[in-house]
Image (cartoon, grey):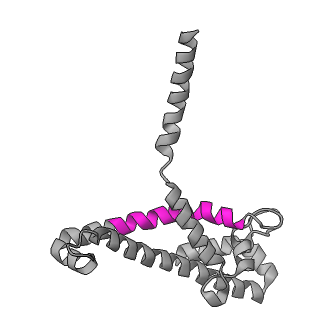
Amino acid sequence: MMIKIAIGFTLVAALAVPVAASAALSPTDYKNASKFCKALEADVADGGMGETAFKQAFGTNHNRSNAHGKCVSKNAHTVDEVHSNAVSQCRTERDADEAAFTQKYGTGKNGRNAFGKCVSQKAKTLSDQEQENIVDAAKACRTERAADRDAFKDKYGTNHNKRNAFGKCVSHKAASA
């Protein structure tokens, strides 16, 4: 009986290792992606794409109520990449001239927080640019759709009723920006 239990635990542990090893995203990545998506959903006057365009771009169910979750899932990797790129840029800058780096980013009496401050600033800049690209893409798609709805659906729609045209357009234009 003890051997069966030991084998059972071993199998569970063996199956859990690949799952844990492949989980590269942290809860913070999803939290930051959620903030990113809320900013995208904001009114156009506030720098976002607006609720309707947001739901059209990301929602997939019949009433597109799953748009926020789909946006978070899609952008969690992007947020992680933005952070990784910021870390890489800061390492390069720090390695070039550590004293100047500490002077530029460090606060407090010894500037020991310079690396964290650098990463925060660069990640925000990269994230803001990504958000701006998506909002600009949504505006361009909205304009293109208004000119000829049927041609727009034919050009971008890929599912049976081509209702995913707006989201496909935004993805295509944001990726090429």
Asked which quadrant contains residue 54, the reply is: bottom right
Going by the picture, which residue comes out furthest to the top?
1
Q: Residue 114 lies in magenta, yes or no? A: no
Question: For the point 52% across and 56% down, which residue is it?
Answer: 27
Tell whether 24 sits left or right of 99. right
Going by the picture, which residue comes out furthest to the front?
109
Work out which quarter of the rendered image holds the N terminus and state it: top right
Tell whether 118 sits left or right of 127. left
Where residue 30 sits: x, y (%)?
A: 55, 60
Where residue 90 sits: x, y (%)?
A: 30, 70
Above or below, 26 against 138 in this view is above
The residue lying toward the viewer, choosing from 71 and 136, is 71
For the stretch drawn in magenta, the main secondary structure is: helix
Where residue 130 sits: x, y (%)?
A: 51, 76
Asked which quadrant contains residue 161, the reply is: bottom right
The residue lying toward the viewer, choosing from 67 and 1, is 1
Where residue 98 sits: x, y (%)?
A: 18, 71
Question: For the point 37% across and 69% down, which residue is it?
Answer: 86
Tell whether 150 sits left or right of 86. right
Question: For the point 55% across and 72% down, which residue is it?
Answer: 175
The residue lying toward the viewer, choosing from 49 and 118, is 118
Q: Residue 74 lies in magenta, yes or no? A: yes
Numbered label tally: 0
Asked which quadrant contains residue 168, the reply is: bottom right
Q: Which residues are magenta?
A: 67-87
Above or below, 92 against 77 in this view is below
Question: For the point 72% across and 78% down, which residue is it?
Answer: 51
